[in-house]
Image (tube, rainbow, N blue to C red):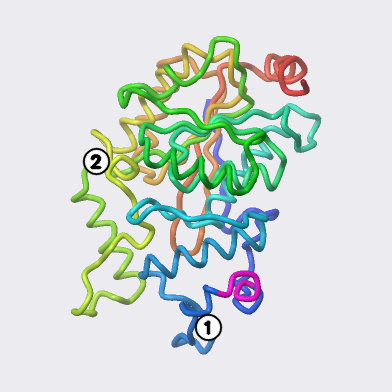
Amino acid sequence: MTSAVTKTSLHPRNLHRERYDFAQLIACSPELAAFVSPNKYGSVSIDFTDPAAVKALNRALLKLHYQIDEWDIPAQYLCPPIPGRADYIHYLADLLAESNGGDIPRGDAVRVLDIGVGANCIYPLIGHASYGWHFVGTDVDETALANAQHIVDANQLGDAIELRLQPSTADIFSGVTYNDEYFALTLSNPPFHASLADARKGSQRKWQNLGKEHNKHKKPVLNFGGQSLELCCEGGEAAFITRMIEESASGGEHCLWFTTLVSKSASLPQAYSALKHFGAVDSRTIEMAQGQKKSRLLAWTFMNKKQRKDWWEQHGKN
């Protein structure tokens, strides 16, 4: 039932395959200049352990490549690495092309549900700019949603991005979708730690990879930030994904492909078992990589190939 596709670099359509052009980024967003300096390799870069620097880089990337003029997040909220997030979007576009004669579908007829849109609203911003898709973003965090709504309003994207509060931390799809709604895709970047202690250990490993382990004057910080609900859930990502698969089974005819990021390969066996148990007809595991970081997306559907084609003819071209 499960097939694997191995990718060793960023997606061919990813705008971030080459090294960052800091001169161009600074010209677009001058505030980035304060964080750019020569590194030990003889080129310029930023300190990726500095949350302010990472946020300034993101703001410049969004402005230069995705025409997002205003973007900010509250302190300590997740500041996502944009190249990896863009990869997710491009692989989803390839997945939809299978039911559209090999052509990537574009425009607002393609409706995408983002579970856990976050304060950064990153997937709707990239997905709409890249393919013109319409997004519904949900979150349990009212502060995160308020910030995401500000981003949407400031960039006049209200017709393309709709945000909804998930009132229950126990539910994923229930309570935020309607019985008469259909989505081509769902996507999610689930909480991947079982506790904040695990999250801190992960931050320590990042610092070591960045050569900061001997800096005694700084304590490791989550350079990409993150609130507890963004980073942690009981049982970690394996439990969250299993619950997502279980809930998706009751609405299989309302979505062409359910998808999620899977940060840890150790989470896959439990996910595969759940897919089999709840009757997924087809699933895909697509490996992705950004520098030293490796992850993968898991996609599943409750329709066979003919049913997917029929679904697309009925709901994907309206």
Could you tell whether 14 is left or right of 113 in the image? right
Left or right? Give the position of 60 relative to 36: right
Camera-nearest residue between 8 and 179:
179
Name the residue rendered at 68%, 39% in the picture: 94
Reply above or below: 150 against 204: above
Q: Earlier in the sequence, mark 1 or mark 2?
A: 1
Under circle 2, the secondary element is loop
Q: Does the magenta segment cover residue 177?
A: no
Which one is nearer the viewer's eye here, 106 or 257?
106
Instruction: Return the residue nearer the eye: 234 or 159.
Output: 159
Say which residue appears at 59% left-offset and 50% top-offset: 87
Q: Nearer the viewer, residue 214 or 2?
A: 214
- Callout 2: few (<14), some (14-19), or many (20+) C-alpha neighbours within 10 Å? some
Instruction: Say if 234 sits above or below 217 in the image.
Output: above
The picture places residue 81, in percent across and down from the top left corner, at 48, 57
The residue lying at 71 percent from left, 18 percent from top is 315
Residue 102 % position (x, y): 79, 35
Kindly identify the amino acid type of the residue bearing the numbered disc 1.
Answer: Val
Residue 195: mark in rendering: none
Q: Are marks 1 and 2 in contact (CB under 8 Å)?
A: no
The image shows residue 200, relative to residue 151, as above or below, that is below
Question: What mark, if any, has residue 44 been given in the picture?
Answer: 1
Q: Which mark is residue 194?
A: 2
* Residue at the image point whose x is 58% and y is 41% from the top: 124
Mark 1–mark 2 Cα distance, whole angstroms, equals 36 Å
Q: Which residues are magenta?
A: 25-30
On whether residue 29 falls in the magenta region, the answer is yes
The x, y position of residue 4, in whole percent, is 55, 39
Q: Chief secondary structure of the magenta span?
A: helix
Q: Quadrant of residue 284?
A: top right
Looking at numbered disc 2 in the image, what kind of residue is underneath it?
A: Ala
Point out the frontmost of discs 1 and 2: 1
